[in-house]
Amino acid sequence: MSTTPSKSHGRLKISATVTPRDLMSDRPDLVGAWTAKIITLFPETFPGTLGASVTGKALQEGLWKLDTIDLRLFGEGKHRNVDDTPSGGGAGMVLRPDIMGRAIRFAQKNASSDRARWPLVYLSPRGKPFDQADAERFAAADGITMICGRFEGLDQRVIEHFDIEEVSLGDFVLTGGEIAAQAMIDATIRLRPGILGNAASAKEESFSDGLLEHPQYTRPADWEGHAIPDVLTSGDHGKVAQWRKKQAERITKDRRPDLWRAYTDKSDRDAKK
Ligand code: SAH
């Protein structure tokens, strides 16, 4: 086992000189690549699903970087304890503020102290629900530090002392923050330049314009008696765009009255301009 409290999954690109090949490539050095620092008791769960497909390829190519920080290494005593019983009683265990504080200071050592450039996030069911705007905000930063809770979560004093932003994956309770962290990193990474093959695909999907996406179809033209809507095979791009917009509006109105209200309010405001 390594003695340093950090593990890097990125492929380090060490080059003392700039060779013509580097000048020609649009691949950025790892130094400066968007970095996710993850404080977790289970570093082995990373990169997890982020190691697959486009996010995995981008990680290998150094387009983004992952640093897991094993909370256990900051623990105390023979068993490297990180938790203790809840003050006031009750079930479960709480992550100790002194241990977590050390891990956070370690993580932040070479991160920007400007939270706009480097958000410090605790994955928590009590947090603000994560959405596409958060993904865009995280993607615009230089990197992020994410704290994965376990047991009953974090001592409140750490959250306040470091002014940590709490973000939730949704209204349900997970056993730990790792899956939430991976979901949010995935949503963030795919917005970074060079990650998705087709940059337009990120602009045209659900939430990007306040609407859910229209239905998608592909060949065969007839599948078990179900045909693809005629308009999609007509070759009339204007009509296709019109149909897709109508479908997106219908689906959003039916399924997400909250999004629909925001969308119509915005359309009204734009019309008055
Ligand atoms: N007792 C806490 C839940 C602890 S769950 C409560 O009722 O609020 C253990 C850990 O899982 C949390 O510390 C958090 O990091 C993570 N977690 C659980 N649900 C989550 C969610 N919906 N979004 C993000 N993280 C979550």
Image: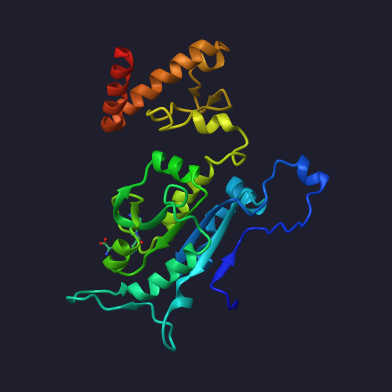
How many marks on residues?
Answer: 0
Q: Quadrant of the C terminus?
A: top left
- At x 39% / y 71%, what residue is drawn? 100
Describe residue 53's horizontal placement relative to residue 101 as left or right. Answer: right
The residue lying toward the viewer, choosing from 60 and 113, is 113
Q: Residue furthest left?
A: 88
- At x 27% / y 23%, what residue is drawn? 265
Q: Quadrant of the N terminus?
A: bottom right
The residue lying toward the viewer, choosing from 136 and 148, is 136
Q: Residue 153, how many percent across, how many down? A: 31, 66
Which of the four quarters of the rendered structure image does ligand 1 lie in?
Answer: bottom left
Q: Residue furthest bottom?
A: 78
- At x 43% / y 47%, what residue is drawn? 116
Q: Residue 75, how many percent across, how many down? A: 42, 79
272 shown above or below 72: above
- At x 37% / y 29%, what residue is drawn? 210
Q: Residue furthest right?
A: 20
Residue 4's quadrant in the figure? bottom right
Q: Residue 189, how many percent across, how many down? A: 53, 46
79 shown above or below 267: below
The residue lying toward the viewer, choosing from 235 and 273, is 273
136 shown above or below 165: above
